[in-house]
Amino acid sequence: MIILYTALTWLLVIITYPVGLLLALFGRSQLLNHFKLPTDIPQDGNIRLWIHAASVGEAGIAVSMAGEVKKSCPEALVFISTITVTGLEKVHLLNKSSAKNLVDYTFLAPIDCPVITQKFVKYIIPTSFILVETEIWPSLIYSLHKKGVPITIINGKLSRRAFRRYMFFRKSIKIIVQKISLFCVQSRTFAKRFTLLGVPSDRIKIIGNIKFDSLPEPLDYDTEAIRLDMGIPLKVKVFVAGSTRPGEEEVLARSFTNILEKYPDTVMILVPRHLNRVSEVEKILDDNGLKYVKRTSGERLDSFDCSILLLDTMGELVSAYACADIAFVGGSLGDFGGHNPMEPAAFGIPVLFGPYMEQTGSKELLSKGAAALVHDEEELAGMIISLFKNYEKSQQMGQAGTAVVHHYKGTLERTLEYMKNYKLI
């Protein structure tokens, strides 16, 4: 299987490099940049940490880890790579907004072909390598292992879908994962799945979710100012549907129609997980006869006879949660594993999600009464209407969520401590 994978990556390079050159002539250099090494790298430095994050969601963790490393080792050189341009932009934004320069070099990750990954490893000379969450790239891992570079997975997770896919190639995956020195994972469920893939149990540490350390502080957000900025009247009820995935917007549209019958002044802020689906979501709203305003249009809800704000921008989901009365967390009605339910919980509001939610903290939110499980449009609409009616119940759920969030913080510090104990940094 490894031989076939390597052959396919060679074929990928043969095809993509000429295409990348051609696209670069027209000013589209993204593909070619996956072959491009970072420039002006000094050859000295006792600690040279390379952190790899897939995209926007993992970029924040990568920068947070860079900051934690710089606290104890300010002389360390930190490199961060991402798969996507948007992920790289998020790294730049977070680095720029920090008080100190946390990240020294950024670049798009190399295509996972041995000749390319070996070139990057030889040039960067990392003393330690970190994979954020679950980015198992065989050629890159082989290249690092061959040079004696210790590899750590932090904030490790393995969704049901990913697990089933990896189990299909278990023999090959087992060889790869055994080259990784330490797995700092989010939950017992994920730990069990990694063990079944062939990871030695003594290399797995259940630490929690690093994203909880960077959860928003409610006092940092002015709810009134956010509503005014988004054109949402101050006295209406606000329901946020965050990080929605295919199949969920139809359910939300039908649910919201039922909610409007009982509470016509309610506003729904709809936030698709991927912005390339905005036109698809618009069609769903149109088909259900729901009027909406897109955030990028410059129009305001309070200037139109509509109750839906379609948030087609990056980086505003947390602000939406901050001004909400209730939140639904997407990716959970379908088999996507769900998204972070702790973000809305941090603002002390009731959290709703579907049966496919696998994110760390979700079980605790349910068991502590901070969240509720919904399976379809009727349950979703019914729960929201019930919470709108029962203010006391809504408050109790919100307070329980805040307590759960507080309990989960400190994961980043524990992760770095384990890495130091294992002499991986």
Image: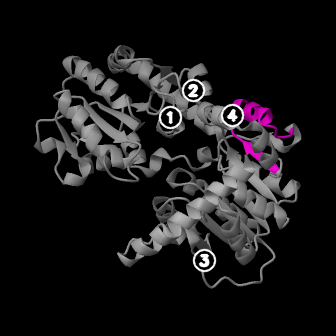
Q: List the residue tagged with mark 3.
A: 38
**The residue tagged with tag 2: helix, strand or loop?**
helix
Query: Real-space Cα distance between discs 2 and 3?
Result: 43 Å
Q: Label 4 crowding class (10 Å Cα cut-off): few <14, some 14-19, many 20+?
A: few
- Kind of element beneath mark 1: helix
- Look at discs 3 and 4 and give the one toward the viewer: 4
Classify residue 142 as left or right of residue 383.
right
Query: Where residue 159 appears, x then y in whole percent?
Result: 62, 34
Label 1 and label 3: CA atoms lie apart by 39 Å
Contact? badges 1 and 2 (CB < 8 Å): yes
Tag 2 residue:
365
The answer for how far apart the CA atoms under marks 1 and 4 are is: 36 Å
Front: mark 1 or 3: 3
Other residues around mark 1 within 10 Å, as few (<14) / some (14–19) / many (≥20): many
Q: Give the magenta-colored segment's residue range.
A: 182-200
Could you tell me which secondary element the residue under label 4 belongs to?
helix
**Residue at image point 69% right, 44% down:** 156
Distance CA(mark 3)–CA(mark 4): 36 Å
User: What amino acid type should be assigned to the residue bearing mark 2?
Assistant: Leu
* Quadrant in which the C terminus is drawn: bottom right
Q: Mark 3 or mark 4: name the one nearer the start of the chain.
A: 3
Q: Nearer the viewer, residue 32 or 160?
A: 32
Q: Earlier in the sequence, mark 2 or mark 4?
A: 4
Q: Which residue is mark 4?
A: 168
Q: Compared with residue 36, is residue 289 higher up or lower down, i.e. above or below?
A: above
Residue 98 seen in the current view: no
The amino acid type of the residue labelled 1 equals Ala
